[in-house]
Image (cartoon, rainbow, N blue to C red):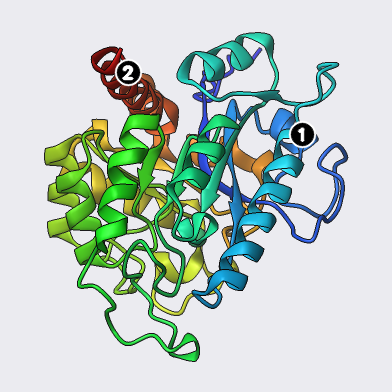
């Protein structure tokens, strides 16, 4: 009888820090369908928790645009929380580090609601409070195109964008970062310009996270992080979550040109520059992520196996796949609690 090798994915709490949902609402998340991520595939891929993004494309920065963005964010967050029905037949809502652990212990996929693009709050901090109240755990400051909060890495001339609107964070954006710290909502700097990212990292009392970005030295794309950004993230306790978007992994590559090995190349590079405590995975499945052999979340163990083949041990893999992000969630909660205690 052949002795089976240990499966490096066994018992692992894997957290994918960035996944989109189809919108307007697409195929049911309760059935194994055409989505990269649905509940059956999460179970099959033994994924512990996922940050599901209410993604708001950047539009006009006026009252009508902000109203529509806010309404879309609410509707999408309702669709995301509906993946965790009260009868326990789906996922389990996980709006804290303890909540993620509880979902994992219950054997149900943890559903972590998040917002991609601070455009969703327009110019109004009260909207941020309301979204935090419904459980969002991070907000991506911008998407492509500048908003009221910050400059984006990719300007949208079709919306009238110049290369920069503020030279980083706007005055409002500085207030937004401070309020996110108070609310325990993580600051996501993926999509933000380098200046926006650097300013957010230095101003934020909780370390910031790039939830789905790759390494610029390996692939020169505007959305990727350069060595100076990696250094600042590591020095401040932040995280770089490597994504599976093909043209962020290799210049002009298509999904079928690449494999999990290409993702591990970026993980390796980040670990060498930043250390094992500052690197993770955010696939951007259903938002453009996917490579050959890892086209959906059911195939998650193939990435884990590639990490093991590259020499990562079980504790290192556990950090990359979830412990680092959980630590950051916990830190955000602590900073919010300290602030609340000081105010009481
Ligand atoms: Zn994105």
Q: Position of residue 246 (x, y in %)?
A: 50, 66
- Residue 2 in sight from this viewpoint: no
Q: Position of residue 167 (x, y in %)?
A: 20, 72
Q: Which residue is mark 1?
A: 83
* Chain-order first, disc 1 or disc 2: 1
Residue at left 50%, top 90%? 158
- How busy is the neighbourhood of tag 2: few (under 14 within 10 Å), some, or many (20 plus)? few
Classify residue 94 as left or right of residue 33: left
Q: Are marks 1 and 2 in contact (CB under 8 Å)?
A: no
Q: Quadrant of residue 94?
A: top right
Rendered-image quadrant of the C terminus: top left
Q: Secondary structure at mark 1?
A: loop
Locate the N terminus and report the quarter of the image it occupies. Answer: top right
Q: Is residue 162 above or below residue 211?
A: below
Q: Which mark is residue 307?
A: none
Vertical arrangement, residue 272 with respect to residue 58, above or below:
above
Q: Is residue 182 above or below residue 259?
A: above
Residue named by callout 2: 340
Indicate if the residue with disc 2 has its beta carbon within 8 Å of ligand 1: no
Which residue appears at 33% of the width and 73% of the height? Answer: 222
Q: Quadrant of residue 226?
A: bottom left
Judging depth in this view, the residue of 284 and 124 nearest the camera is 124
In the image, taking residue 232 as reference, residue 224 lies left or right, namely right
């Amino acid at each position: 009888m052949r002795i089976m090798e240990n499966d490096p994915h066994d018992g692992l709490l894997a957290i994918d820090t960035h996944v989109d949902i189809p919108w307007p609402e697409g195929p049911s998340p309760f059935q194994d369908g055409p989505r990269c991520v649905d509940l059956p595939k999460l179970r099959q891929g033994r994924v512990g928790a996922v940050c599901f993004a209410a993604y708001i494309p950047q539009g006009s920065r006026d009252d009508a645009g902000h109203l529509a963005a806010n309404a879309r964010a609410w509707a999408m967050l309702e669709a995301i929380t509906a993946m965790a029905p009260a009868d326990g037949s789906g996922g389990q809502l996980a709006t804290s580090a303890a909540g993620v652990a509880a979902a994992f212990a219950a054997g149900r996929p943890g559903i972590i609601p998040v917002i991609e693009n601070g455009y969703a709050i327009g110019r109004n901090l009260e909207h941020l409070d309301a979204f935090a109240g419904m459980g969002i755990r991070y907000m991506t400051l911008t998407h492509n195109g500048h908003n009221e909060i910050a400059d984006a890495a990719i300007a949208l001339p079709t919306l009238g964008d110049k290369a920069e609107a503020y030279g980083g964070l706007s005055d409002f954006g500085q207030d937004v970062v401070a309020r996110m710290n108070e609310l325990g909502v993580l600051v996501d700097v993926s999509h933000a310009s380098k200046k926006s990212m650097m300013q957010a990292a230095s101003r934020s009392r909780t370390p910031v996270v790039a939830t789905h970005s790759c390494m610029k030295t390996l692939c020169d794309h505007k959305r990727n992080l350069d060595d100076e950004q990696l250094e600042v993230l590591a020095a401040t306790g932040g995280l770089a979550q490597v994504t599976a978007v093909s043209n962020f992994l290799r210049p002009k590559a298509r999904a079928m040109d690449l494999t999990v090995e290409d993702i591990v190349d970026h993980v390796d590079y980040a670990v060498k520059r930043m250390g094992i405590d500052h690197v993770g995975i955010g696939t951007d499945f259903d938002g453009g992520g996917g490579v050959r052999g890892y086209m959906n979340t059911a195939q998650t163990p193939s990435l884990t196996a590639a990490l093991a083949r590259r020499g990562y041990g079980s504790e290192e893999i556990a950090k990359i796949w979830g412990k680092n992000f959980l630590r950051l969630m916990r830190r955000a909660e602590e900073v919010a609690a300290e602030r609340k205690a000081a105010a009481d």
